Amino acid sequence: MADVRRMDQLYVLLYRMNDDPPALPASDAEMMNRHRAFLQDLLDRKLMFGSGATKDETGVRHAAGLVILRAHSLAQAQAIALEEPFCKAGQRRVEVIPWQRTWFEA
C-alpha cells in the first residue's frame, strides 16, 4: 500500500526586535502578561500550533520569538500576527511565512 501524503497549511510568525523601538506603553511585567494572554487566546481558539523562544543550545537568542499559527489565509495570519502586544507597541516586527507541514501515513 502506498504512503498517503498529508498536509496542513500553517503560518510561521517570526518576531524580531526593532533596532530603535519606542518606549513601552506599560511595564515589562505588564507587557509580558499581555503577551502571554495573546498566546493563551490563540491556544484557546485552537489557532496556535506551537510557540517559543528562538534560542540555541547555549541560550543565544536568534530572534524575539516564533509562533506557528493555524489560519484560513495569509491575510488572516498577518492580521493576527500584528496583534501581538510587543509588535503593536513597536518593539518587534514580524515576518509571516506560509508553511505547509507535510507528513506521510501508511
Image (cartoon, rainbow, N blue to C red):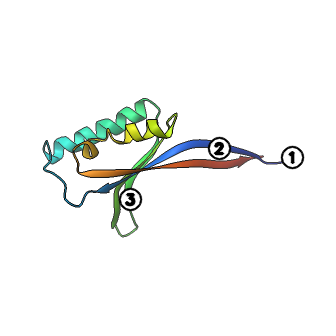
**43 up-or-down from 62: above or below:** above
The answer to which of 25 and 73 lies nearer the viewer is: 73
On screen, residue 90 versus residue 94, left or right, reads left
**Which of the labelled discs sits on residue 1, or is there none?**
1
Q: What element carries label 3?
A: strand
On screen, residue 54 versus residue 73, left or right, reads left
Q: Classify 10 Å Cα crowding around label 1: few (below 14), some (14-19), many (20 and above).
A: few
Q: Classify 10 Å Cα crowding around label 3: few (below 14), some (14-19), many (20 and above).
A: some
From the top left corner, tell me how far across and down residue 58 is, in percent: 36, 70
**In the figure, residue 89 lies in which quadrant?**
top left
Quote the CA–CA distance across marks 1 and 2: 19 Å
The total of numbered circles placed on residues is: 3
Work out which residue is located at the far top of the displayed protein and give it: 45
Q: Classify 10 Å Cα crowding around label 2: few (below 14), some (14-19), many (20 and above).
A: few
Quote the CA–CA distance across marks 1 and 3: 39 Å
Disc 2 marks which residue? 7
Identify which residue is drawn at 15% across, 47% down. Answer: 24
Work out which residue is located at the far front of the displayed protein and give it: 75
On screen, residue 91 versus residue 59, left or right, reads left
From the top left corner, tell me how far across and down residue 14 is, in percent: 40, 53
Report the amino acid beneath label 3. Answer: Thr
Identify which residue is drawn at 35% across, 60% down. Answer: 63
Q: Is mark 1 on a helix, strand or loop?
A: loop
Q: What element carries label 2?
A: strand
Identify which residue is drawn at 25% across, 57% down. Answer: 18
Report the amino acid beneath label 2. Answer: Met
Disc 3 marks which residue? 54
The answer to which of 26 and 80 lies nearer the viewer is: 80
Badge 1 or badge 2: first in the primary sequence: 1
**Which of the labelled discs sits on residue 49, or is there none?**
none
CB atoms at circles 3 and 2 under 8 Å apart?
no
Badge 3 or badge 2: first in the primary sequence: 2
